Every structure is written in C-alpha cells, then in structure tokens.
Image (spheres, helix red, strand yellow):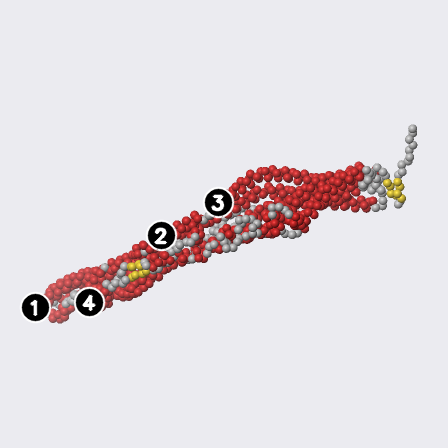
C-alpha cells in the first residue's frame, strides 16, 4: 500500500509581554473587551456597543424673573466699573499682609466708580434728613411755602397743570421701580428656596459621574475577562474548530470519491442479487428444458417405432417431421461465469470497510489536532491566565478609592447643606419680610402721591376762592404733603439699604460673576502661585501643566478624561494596544508544534485490479446469444407435428399415431404453461443484469477517476491545506484582538469618563449665585435706588402742587387784570 505522509505545522504568535505599568495592563484588558464567538468559521468582528453613559438630572436654566432688568443693572455696573478684574492688584493684595499707601491708592483708583456712587449715596443719606428738617422748620415759620396764601396770576392754571403732570410722571416712575422691587424680592426668594434643591441635583450628578467612572472601568475589565475566557474556550476546542474546518475543505474533494464508492458498493451488491436470481432462473429453465427434451425424445422414439411397423404405408414421408422433434435444450450465457467471479471478488474485498476506513480517517482529524496541540494549548492558556492576573493586579493599583473618598466628601457637603437649609430658609423669610416692608414704605409714598393726584383735581374748582376750596381738594393737597413728608422721613434709611446692597451685590458681580461668566475668573485661578499645590499637570506627572480653565472648556464639550487630563502624555496607547507585542511567546510556542495525520490509501493496487477486471467483464456481458436461445425455445411448436400425425393417421390402420399426436399436444401445452413463463422471467432478469452491467462499467470508471483525483489531492495538497486553515484559525483570533484593540482605543479616548457633569456643576453654581441670587439682589437695590432718586423731584413737585389744592387762609382774587386784595378793616377795641 502506498503511504502518504500528511504532516502540518503552523505558527501562531502570541505573548502577554511584560507590562511596564499597571495602566498598560488595564489598556490590554480593555483591548480584549469583547467576547469571541466560538465558531468554526471566522466571521467579521462585530462592532462593539458603546459604553452606556449615565443619566444625569436636569439642573436650573438661565431664566430668571428679573432677567428684564439684568441688562439695565449690568450696563450701570459696567459704567461704574468698566475695567476687568485686576489680576496684578489681586495678586498684590494676596501676597502682601499689610496695605501700604501705594497699594491702597491703586485699590482706590480701581474702585473710583464705586467710591463716587458711595459718595453720592452718603450725601443723599446726610442731606435728605437735613434738608427735610430745615424745610419743615422753614415752613413752620411761614416761609418756603408755609404761608397759607397763594397769589393768583394769569398763569396759575398752566403752572398747576405742569406741576400736576410732572408729579404724576414722577410718581408713575417711582411706582414702576416699586413694582420691580416687589418682583425682584420674590425672585430672590424663589432663587434662595430653590438653591438647596439645585445644589442637591448638582451634587447627585457629580456623585453619579464619580460612580460611573469605576463602573465603566469595571465594565471593560469584566468584558476583557469574558474575552479571555472565550479565547481560552476556543483553544480548548481547537480540535473541533480547526479540525472541522480542515475536514470541510477535504470533503470538497474526497466526498465525491466516497459517494462513488458507496454507489459502487451498492451496485455490486445488487449485481450479486441479480446474478443469483439469474442463476436460479437458468437452473430452473434448464431443468424444464431437460424434462422437455426427455419427453419429446420419448414421443419421438415411439413415433419412430410406429412408423417402422409393417402396416404403416407411406410412413417415410413423416421422417422429416421426426427430425423437427430433435431439440437443443442447452441454455448458456457467454462470460457469465467470469463476470460472476469478478463480482464475487469485489464483494469479498468489502468496499464498505474501505468506506468506513476513510470516514474514520476524516473523523480522526479533530482528535488528532487536539492531541498534537495539547501542550501548546496549555502553555497559551497559562499566558492568558497571567494576563488576567496582571489585569486584576493593575485594577487593584488604580486609585479608584480616591473617587470613593471624593464621593464621601460630596455626601458630607450634602449633609451640611441639608443642615444649613432650614436656617437659610428661616433667614430668608426674615429678609423677605424686611424687603417687603421696604417696598411698602415706597408704596406708601406712591399711594399718598396718587391719592393727592386723584383727590386734588377731583375737588378743585379753578374759579373758586382759594380760601373756599373743597375738603376733597384740601385732602388731596394734604396727601401730597404726606408723600413728601414720608419721603423725607424714610428716604435716607432706604438709601442706606441701597448703599449696603450696592456695595455687596455690585462687587460680587464685578469681581466674581462677570469674570466667571466670561472665563477670566478661571484663568485668574490658573495664575501660577495663586493657589499653592494647584499644579495639576505636575501632580499627574505630565510634561505640560493643565489649567482649570482648560479642564472646564473640555468638560463644557463633554470631553472624556483621556483628552481633558492629557493622559496621552502618560500613556502611549498605540504602543500598549499593539497586539503583536503580546503574541510573540504564543507564536514561538506554536512554531514548534506539528500536527501529524494518520496515513491513508484510498485504493490498493489489488482492489484497483479487481475493479478494472469487473469493468472489463461487465463489458463482455452480452444478451445476444441468450436472446437467440430463448427465441429458439419460444419458437418450438409441437402442435404442427401433431396435426400432421393426425392427418396421416386418418388413412392408416394404426391408431398409435393419434395417441402420439395427443402426447405432443400435451407437451406443447406444458411448454406454454411452464417454460414460456420461465423464459419471460429469465428475460426480465437478463435485462436487469444488462442494465446494471452497463451502470457498473460507468461507476467503476468514475470510482477509479475520482479516487485517483482524491488520492492525488491528499498526497499533494493536504499539508498545505492544513497549514492554511491553521493560519486562518489563528489569524481569526488575532483579528478579534485587533478589532477589540480599535474598540478599546475608541472607548478610552472618546467614551470613558466624559466630564460634562463637572462643567455642569460649575455652571449650576454660577447660575445659582450670579444669574439667580446676585441678579435678583442687584435688581432689588437698583429698583430701590431708582425710587430714591426720583423721590427728590417727587418731593419738589408734590410740595409745590399741594398749594394748588389746599385751602388757603388768605384770599387773593384775580379779575380783569386787576388784582384785588382783601384788606381787613381796623377794629377798635373797647376798653
């Protein structure tokens, strides 16, 4: 038997490599962070799902109820403080423990706008009560409009109307400011009340972010463990996986040979059955023919004896008929015996055993692969186990506990907020009540003015004597004087409130809110040396420093920690995710591994000769001779001879010829009832034999051709196929690693630790402090100051207008351009 040595060896590179840092192992773990499906065909690597980002609570927006005044207040504050935050000045204040004259001068120059406003406010606070006091004293002395006398002129009505509308417009302006006071006070209350809830949402968002980062790391690490387990499972099933694929390629060529083998085996079995049936039919027919020949010979001898009797006349004429009774009963099929021998030889070869042998050869390939790769699989699994151990060690070295500590700090801050919130709420109620009282004071002045403006014209008769004005008009004038008096009484106290709130809210806006909003505050915090220990880049070991403003800008766009913290300066991600770095050892292990398949010879030379002989003998089978023999037998007709005997016996005294004719008819009847059916059956069997002989001839040729092709395929291509499929299997595994390395690169650089909540927390604090509280506070003092400024013209117009409505004590009448003054007569006192 010809021996075909089928050997194959392949190379599979792989090594865990020595990790230089714990982060490197983490990156390798992430690069494996998807499962490998154990299939016998290498599919395209599935696109991994992106990390599920945490869901954060919605925080406050920028809309406030005082937004309509924000632009006006900010424009005023920009006028007061046009320059930006003085970084050099602040640095000097921070670094110098005591103020010197130069520093104080620089501060005063910077704050000159606020100083001017403070000076105006102080003058207002000082002068308003003084002016009010002197005005009251002056009026009590009958001066400054205190004398209850009004000179009547031609322009008195015009002056009254002018003063009326001036006082009305001034009062409306004060009322508008008072409404803004109420609204800003309510907005400030809402802002303060909602601040704890918004801070809680912000802290919860930061807490969610800090919790999500370790969870994301755990997710990718757990996925890397799953991948290692799947790859390990593939190594455990390398026999079924690789062997099945090799077998699939083999079967593409070998299955046609096996199928032809099975067909030939079935045909030879069928041929044996047909041959047995044919032999049985031939034997039965031969037996019948032998009996026929014996019977016909007996009748022929009797007829010959009858014809030889002396009383038979003209019997010589029947001798020719006697020659027809000589039958050839031998039935043979040429080359049938040789064909039978060839078929028996093939059947004795047991083709089924050869088929079973080839099937066993194919089925042994997976087990052979498993056996020959046992050692290298164990060593590769050990490398994967080392990778898993190193990943676990690297994860334990990552300072995720600091995030937990920061979460604990946030929890403590939340508890502090919950503790302070009730106190703040209580203080807010007091503040709200005080501000409402201030608003009501201003409203009192407005009401007095409006009552005077309503009652005065309502009760005034322009042509009436000033001493006879109605009580309604007089009451209107009194209300106007009350408004002026309340203005003098409370305006300096209200201006004091304006001054304090202006210094507080204005400086908070100019020094904190404005630079915070335009980003200058964060840039100022980044000033080197301002806050000791704030060198984030140096703390992380980076080559460049990271600014707070840069971190905020990146987090504003929800960038991942990889770019925000410049981790690419610490970690060469492309180098760490280079799969070939970690596959050297595994490739070296597989390089020396050989898979040796068992030898197989599909057909031995003896079997080939037997099949060739079978094909040759099948060609020699011919039905021509047997057909002629059957036609001869079927053409036997003894009735003709019997009829001639009957016809001849009519003129003969011998009656034996009739008996012999009757015997011939009986024999003919036996031929028709026995031999003819046997001939028909034999004919069917011969047709089946002829058909299967032709089929066998083609099948044998197909078997020899396909088996030859298959044998040549095994001899020349098996080794190369085994190597090729081995490389495909190994490249498939490496393909998964490469795909997952790309996934890891994308995940690390674009998805892990998106810090949008950090910027959101900064924005929320800025929104609560500046956009809500400070803007509402500034709107309140601005509205109150607005009212205080317009108190001055309100006082002037109210005092002057009141004289046109109040009842005078001295009459003055204007008639025909002659002013008539009532002169009281002198009265004599009686003594």
- Disc 1 secondary structure class: loop
Residue extending furthest toward the left: 310
Residue at 66% x, 43% y is: 501
Residue 782 at x, y = what percent?
Answer: 68, 45
Cα gap from disc 4 to disc 3, whole angstroms: 101 Å
Mark 4 near mark 3, Cβ–Cβ under 8 Å? no
The residue that mark 2 highlights is: 382
Give 334 or 220, whichever is nearer the viewer: 220
Give 605 or 376, whichever is nearer the viewer: 376
Q: Which circle's residue, 1 or 3, is located before the other in the chain?
A: 1
Cα gap from disc 2 to disc 3, whole angstroms: 34 Å
Residue at 68% x, 40% y is: 438
Give 98 or 248, whichever is nearer the viewer: 98
The residue that mark 4 highlights is: 334
- Disc 3 secondary structure class: helix
The residue that mark 3 highlights is: 404
The residue that mark 1 highlights is: 310
Quarter occupied by residue 494? top right
Report if residue 379 is visible in the image: yes
Residue at 59% x, 38% y is: 423
Above or below: residue 8 compared with residue 111: below
């Amino acid at each position: 038997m010809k021996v075909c040595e089928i050997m194959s060896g392949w190379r599979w590179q792989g090594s865990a490599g020595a990790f230089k840092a714990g982060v490197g192992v983490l990156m390798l773990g992430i690069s494996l962070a998807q499962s490998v499906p154990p299939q016998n065909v290498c599919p395209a690597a599935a696109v991994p799902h992106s990390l599920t980002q945490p869901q954060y609570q919605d925080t406050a927006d920028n809309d406030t109820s005082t937004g309509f005044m924000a632009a006006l207040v900010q424009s005023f504050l920009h006028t007061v403080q046009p320059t930006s935050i003085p970084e050099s000045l602040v640095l000097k204040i921070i670094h110098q423990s005591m103020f010197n004259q130069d520093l104080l001068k620089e501060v005063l120059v910077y704050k000159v706008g606020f100083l001017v406003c403070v000076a105006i406010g102080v003058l207002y606070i000082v002068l308003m009560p003084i002016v009010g006091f002197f005005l009251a004293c002056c009026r009590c002395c009958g001066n400054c409009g205190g004398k209850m006398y009004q000179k009547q002129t031609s322009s008195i009505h015009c002056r009254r109307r002018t003063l009326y509308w001036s006082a009305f417009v001034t009062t409306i302006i004060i009322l508008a400011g008072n409404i803004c006071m109420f609204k800003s006070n309510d907005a400030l209350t809402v802002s303060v009340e909602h601040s704890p809830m918004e801070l809680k949402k912000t802290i919860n968002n930061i807490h969610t972010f800090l919790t999500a980062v370790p969870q994301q790391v755990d997710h990718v690490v757990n996925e890397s463990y799953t991948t290692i387990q799947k790859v390990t499972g593939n190594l455990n099933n390398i026999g079924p996986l690789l062997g099945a694929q090799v077998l699939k390629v083999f079967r593409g060529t070998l299955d046609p040979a096996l199928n032809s083998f099975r067909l030939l085996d079935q045909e030879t079995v069928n041929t044996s059955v047909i041959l047995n049936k044919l032999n049985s039919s031939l034997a039965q027919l031969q037996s019948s023919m032998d009996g026929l020949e014996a019977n016909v010979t007996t009748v022929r001898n009797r007829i010959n004896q009858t014809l030889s009797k002396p009383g038979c006349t003209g019997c010589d004429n029947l001798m020719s008929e006697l020659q027809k009774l000589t039958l050839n009963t031998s039935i043979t099929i040429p080359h049938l015996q040789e064909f039978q021998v060839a078929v028996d030889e093939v059947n004795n070869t047991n083709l089924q055993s050869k088929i079973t042998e080839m099937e066993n050869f194919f089925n042994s390939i997976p087990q052979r692969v498993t056996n020959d790769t046992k050692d290298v699989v164990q060593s590769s699994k050990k490398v994967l186990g080392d990778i898993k151990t190193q990943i676990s060690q690297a994860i334990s070295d990552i300072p995720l506990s600091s995030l937990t500590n920061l979460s604990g700090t946030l929890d403590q801050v939340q508890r502090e907020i919950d503790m302070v919130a009730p106190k703040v709420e209580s203080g807010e109620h007091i503040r709200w009540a005080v501000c409402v009282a201030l608003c009501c004071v201003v409203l009192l002045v407005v009401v007095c003015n409006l009552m005077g403006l309503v009652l005065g014209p309502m009760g005034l008769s322009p042509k009436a004597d000033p001493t006879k004005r109605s009580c309604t008009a007089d009451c209107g004038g009194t209300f106007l004087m009350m408004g002026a008096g309340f203005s003098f009484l409370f305006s300096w106290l209200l201006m004091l409130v304006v001054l304090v709130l202006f210094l507080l809210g204005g400086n908070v806006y100019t020094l904190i809110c404005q630079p915070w909003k335009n980003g200058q505050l964060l840039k100022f915090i980044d000033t080197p040396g301002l806050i000791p220990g704030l060198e984030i880049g140096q703390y992380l070991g980076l080559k460049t420093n990271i600014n707070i403003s840069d971190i905020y800008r990146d987090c504003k766009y929800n960038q991942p920690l990889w770019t925000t913290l410049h981790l690419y300066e610490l970690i060469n991600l492309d180098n760490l995710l280079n799969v070939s770095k970690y596959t050297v050892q595994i490739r070296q292990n597989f390089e020396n591994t050989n898979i040796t398949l068992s030898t197989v010879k599909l057909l031995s030379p003896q079997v080939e000769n037997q099949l060739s002989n079978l094909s040759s003998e099948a060609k020699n089978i011919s039905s021509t001779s047997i057909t002629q023999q059957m036609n001869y037998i079927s053409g036997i007709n003894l009735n003709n001879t019997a009829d001639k005997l009957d016809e001849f016996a009519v003129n003969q005294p011998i009656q034996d010829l009739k008996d012999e004719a009757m015997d011939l008819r009986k024999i003919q009847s036996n031929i028709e009832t026995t031999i003819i059916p046997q001939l028909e059956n034999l004919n069917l069997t011969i047709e089946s034999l002829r058909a299967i002989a032709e089929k066998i001839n083609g099948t044998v040729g197909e078997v020899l051709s396909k088996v030859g092709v298959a044998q040549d395929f095994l001899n020349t291509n098996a080794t190369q196929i085994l190597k090729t499929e081995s490389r495909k299997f190994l490249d498939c595994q490496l393909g998964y690693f490469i795909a997952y390395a790309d996934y890891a690169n994308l995940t690390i650089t674009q998805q892990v630790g998106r810090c949008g909540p950090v910027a959101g927390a900064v924005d929320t604090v800025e929104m609560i402090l500046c956009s809500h509280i400070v803007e509402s506070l500034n709107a309140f003092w601005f509205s109150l100051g607005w009212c205080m400024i317009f108190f001055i013209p309100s006082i002037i117009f109210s005092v002057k207008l009141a004289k046109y409505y109040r009842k005078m004590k001295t009459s003055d009448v204007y008639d025909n351009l002659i002013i008539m003054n009532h002169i009281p007569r002198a009265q004599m006192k009686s003594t």
